[in-house]
Amino acid sequence: MNENTSGIVETVDQETIMGDIEVKEPGIHDEGKEIPFPEYRAPDEEEEDPKWPEDSNLQSLIYKLPDDKLPIIYDDIYNITFMGLQKLHPFDSEKWGRIVDILSNDGCKAFQKLRSMVCKPREATDDILAVVHTQDYLDSLKWSSKVARVTEVLPIAILPNFVVQSKLLRKLRTQTGGTVLAAYAAYRRGWSINIGGGFHHCYSTDGGGFCAYADITMAIKMLMEKVDLDRIMIVDLDAHQGNGHERDFMGNEKVYIMDVYNRSIYPQDEYAKGAIKKKCPIVPGLKTDPYMEVVTYNYQKALEEFKPQFILYNAGTDILEGDPLGMLNISEEGVIQRDEFVFKLAREQQIPIAMVTSGGYQRSTANVIARSIINLHLHDLIPR
Ligand SMILES: [Zn+2]
């Protein structure tokens, strides 16, 4: 089966990489009227939530957003600070708190009191995670050696598991709860940002690439259970292929996956590629302008094709120039432009959008994400 599909994959590769894409239209910016809006509309605040299925475990992660809070999901618990983990892994493990610090201190007035305006997520405990994960996988994380492999931080293998649970996995479980809450927040308010999450390499039976829990899969399952949506789009613009959600939604017609990824880096999961509906493999070192062409053209096409009722945006910033893992060459302005474009079309077409921050491994990453959020605010794309 792999041999058969690899030929197809290669053809798509060439088309996308060579820029052999008909960039005829300047964008639905200018021709927006011709594209029908999807039937979905965001619910009124007064509107009653649909009832949960009785056996649903996911509902404990959800609560009604207070009016004085923004649909920005964050808790200081997100940040990982033990044994100099940040020195052992290229991942900036305090990135999430730094984003909030920058927004509060150096951002515009709107975010000055951000810490008191965010919605705090609840931890996705094992019984809730079982909605997505097999018991075997959840049990395997009780072995520190397994966690070391999933997170690619080998010294974790020698730590007692209770330390690994409290200092690392609990944080990732809270970020996972954050993504589920963010999906609900976007459904109610039209947009949301989980300052963490985006563990797109994890799927029901395994983790990898620092991703221990399949938060994107869980968030989408919540939307399907709670809100009964039929057309959910994942826009995965992290530098890596999102093989986790791809494996989880393989063959599921309700989920449309667009993935723009560096074709020469981890995970190169050929099987998972079979789930991508809009596949955009790009070459290492790709620069901002051709990257933006690939993103804008394919994103517009994807929206036209699928007319999603909801967008889950995996906004990894490891596309940034200098990122040791992403191996791409996108400028800071390019990242900000990209996020703006993704939000702009979603908002114009009244499609609720939930963003998660995903990969991004440099010390400068937090600053870029904060600047991007401010830019979204300045363009009125994330109104109160
Ligand atoms: Zn990545």
Image: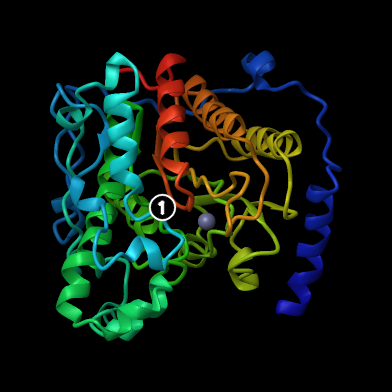
Q: Is the CB atom of the residue marked by disc 1 within 8 angstroms of ligand 1's nearest atom? A: no
Q: Is residue 145 above or below residue 114?
A: below
For mark 1, give the secondary structure: loop
Q: Residue drawn 20% across and 59% down?
A: 124
**Residue 67 on image: x %, y %:** 15, 22
Front position in the image: 291 or 188? 291
Which quadrant of the rendered structure holds the N terminus?
A: bottom right
| Label total for image | 1
Q: Residue drawn 17% across and 56% down?
A: 123
Where residue 376 sits, quadrant-wise, is top left
Which quadrant of the rendered structure holds the C terminus?
A: top left
Q: Residue drawn 28% across and 34% down?
A: 101
Front position in the image: 94 or 136? 94
**Residue 300 on image: x %, y %:** 65, 32
Left or right of residue 284: residue 50: left
Q: Is residue 193 visible?
A: yes
Name the colour scheme. Answer: rainbow
Left or right of residue 320: residue 116: left
**Residue 215 on image: x %, y %:** 34, 57
Q: Is residue 187 visible?
A: no
Left or right of residue 46: residue 9: right
**Residue 282 on image: x %, y %:** 72, 52
- The amino acid type, in three-letter code, at marker 1 is Gly
Front position in the image: 232 or 122? 122
Q: Residue drawn 19% across and 52% down?
A: 77
How packed mark 1 is, by other alpha carbons closer than 10 Å (few <14, some 14-19, many 20 or more), is many
Q: Is residue 287 above or below residue 24?
A: below
| Residue hosting label 1 | 198
Left or right of residue 42: residue 75: left
